[in-house]
Structures are given as C-alpha cells and as structure tokens.
Image: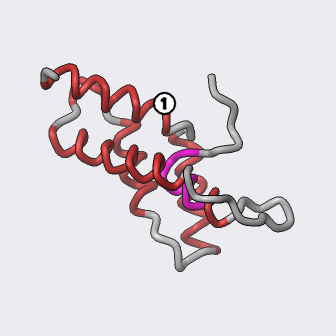
Amino acid sequence: MKKDALKERVYQNYKTLVNIPTKDLTELGGFIKNFRKHMDIRPIQKNIRLLQKPKADWNVHDYSSANKVIQFITNMKKVSNGPSYDGCPSNRDMCLMIWGHDPRRKKK
C-alpha cells in the first residue's frame, strides 16, 4: 500500500472511531481532573490536539498517535461491558470515552 493511501486510511479510521467533539472532550477532561483524579487524561489531550489540527498539517507523529487511538478503541470495544451505576457509564465505556469514543452515540 502506498504511503499516502495508508495515511488516508489511518485518518479516516480515526475520524470514524473518535466520535466525541473537541468541546465535549474538553469538558470530560475537566470532570476527570476534578472528580476522577486517578484517571489519566493524556488520551483526551492527544485527541483534542489531533481533532484541532488540520489534516494537511498532520505529520508522522500525528499518524502514529492516531493509530494508537484506533488500536486502543478497537481492542477495548471487544471487552465485555460491566455494569453502570446511577446513569454513569461503565468502566469500559468511561475508558472508551477518555480515548474519544462514546459507544452510546449513534453512527452518522
């Protein structure tokens, strides 16, 4: 596969899997910082950076980061979902959301 085709595939897969808008990721990061301090918000920061950066400006590091996000979401979606409490997402769903994917959102 040619390099440009591979980059396009990574970009499209990333845009398909990451279904939480930047604004919502920013709010989620603030919530986690204040109430779930034990959780790592670096994946949120990574996704905000990628979502705000124009595709034309993506570099090798960005495609590598997007690939890691794709791999995590793809693998975590295979994990069985645990219970949710009082309307809060399950641990699995919260992990997916931190990585930019809300499994409760409908596909476009």
Residue depicted at x 21% and y 30%: 57
Residue depicted at x 33% and y 29%: 11
The N terminus lies in quadrant: top left
Toward the viewer: 72 or 58? 72
Residue 86 within the segment the image draws in magenta: no
Q: Residue furthest bottom?
A: 38
Residue 98 within the segment the image draws in magenta: yes
What is the x, y in percent for residue 42?
39, 62
Q: Is residue 59 left or right of residue 27?
A: left
Instruction: Answer above or below: position of 16 versus 75.
Output: above
Q: Which residue is mark 1?
A: 16
Residue depicted at x 60% and y 73%: 34
Q: Secondary structure at mark 1?
A: helix
The residue stretch that appears in magenta: 94-101
Toward the viewer: 71 or 52? 71
What is the x, y in percent for residue 20?
56, 40
What is the x, y in percent for residue 80?
64, 59
Instruction: Answer above or below: position of 92 versus 49.
Output: below
Q: Main secondary structure of the magenta part?
A: helix
Residue depicted at x 17% and y 21%: 4
Toward the viewer: 92 or 94? 92
Q: Tell how many labels.
A: 1
Give the residue type at disc 1. Thr
Instruction: Answer above or below: position of 5 versus 90.
Output: above
Q: Is residue 74 left or right of residue 11?
A: right
- Dot 1, how many residues are within 10 Å of its Cα: few (below 14), some (14-19), or many (20+)? few
